[in-house]
Amino acid sequence: MPDNARSVIADDIAAMEMLLCRTLTNADTFVDEVIRYSLQVGGKRLRPMLLFLAGKTVGTIAEQHILAAASIELVHTATLIHDDILDGASVRRHLATFNVRWNAQIGVLAGDFLLTKALELIAQTDSLFAVRQLTAACKQTCEGELLQIGSAGGFEISFDDYLRIIGGKTAPLLACSAEIGAFFADADVSVTEKFRLFGQKIGLAFQIIDDVLDLVGKTDTAGKTLRTDLIHHKPTLPLILYLRDASEHERNDMLVRIRRDDFDGQTADEIVAHLTSAGSIAAARKTAQQLADEADELLAGIPGNAAAKQALSDMTRFVVSRQM
């Protein structure tokens, strides 16, 4: 994450971290150990940063921002825990996932516990708007996951269908974060809508880069289990673009490879090599960059704090250039 982005909102992030620590403290030793572990395997704080920077761009940070940021981060962490169970992942943030350190049952319950804590915090904002937007984002995220599971093996889906699927994954919480950040800074409706679209486009770009890094990333760098999309036959943009542009022979050969019952590491390496040489990896990155550029254009039309706006612009570049 860009250092200047963090520096602009360092005090706000620190206040949120203190709230998370208080919120996740439990009198029972075992429950306390399990729940506090989520602070270590949780996210990069991208969503709270987006929320705070949106707020600081158009106004000042209030207690409601802190509560909302912590709530959204808890929702995100819960989705990571549940995703690791669904994907059978063993590593997250260079640490054992919940389902490995304990088991899937504890992982499910830990994620559910975080969701209830998130509801407690967002309710404390006394804002029906914030509650509605966060619950809507949660619903969209669940729908996106179901759509992706339902599309497993459907590698020849259209680009628009792919965008519809990933539009319900990373994007809803990022859009919600930016929108709520502006809302609690008393921005008018047109500005909060621009921030929602800004977060949506960043979310789409983020997910496309996730697709790419799941293929070409290094486990040591990523700190999490990779190539789970291939293992679970999820249609991702590099594959969709390859199959769209390939010859009939190349397309059939790729479908045979990816649908093999004995799918292994060597097969995955062969698939990645084909996608790379065909330019499909580069094309997916280009699509992510276009979305980031569109997000920047939206940001340019919003007047406000120059330092906060620059930090948001730097975040768009981070999203498409990150290595995990």
Image: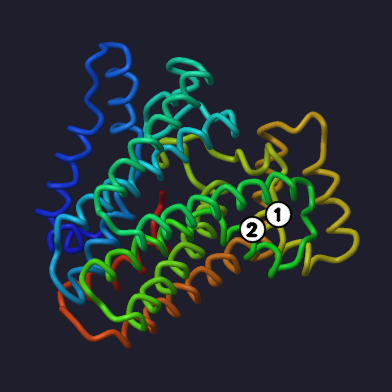
Residue 291 horizontal side relative to residue 160, left or right: left
Q: Vertically, is 231 above or below 99?
A: below
Residue positioned 36% across, 74% down in the render: 195
Report the disc number at residue 274.
Answer: 1
Describe the element under mark 2 as helix, strand or loop.
helix
Query: In the rendered view, how is the structure colored?
Result: rainbow
Q: Vertically, is 308 above or below 191?
A: above
Q: Position of residue 221 (x, y in %)?
A: 39, 41
Q: Vertically, is 118 above or below 53?
A: above
Residue positioned 49% across, 22% down in the render: 99
Splitting the image into 4 quarters, where does residue 65 fall?
Answer: bottom left
Report the Cα–Cα distance between label 1 and label 2.
24 Å
Splitting the image into 4 quarters, where does residue 259 fall?
Answer: top right
Residue positioned 26% across, 11% down in the render: 29
| Amino acid at circle 1 | His
Report the disc number at residue 165.
Answer: 2
Question: Which circle, 1 or 2, is nearer the viewer?
Answer: 2
Residue 272 horizontal side relative to residue 189, left or right: right
Q: Position of residue 206 (x, y in %)?
A: 46, 59
Splitting the image into 4 quarters, where does residue 131 fall?
Answer: bottom left
Q: Vertically, is 230 above or below 275?
A: above
| Amino acid at circle 2 | Ile
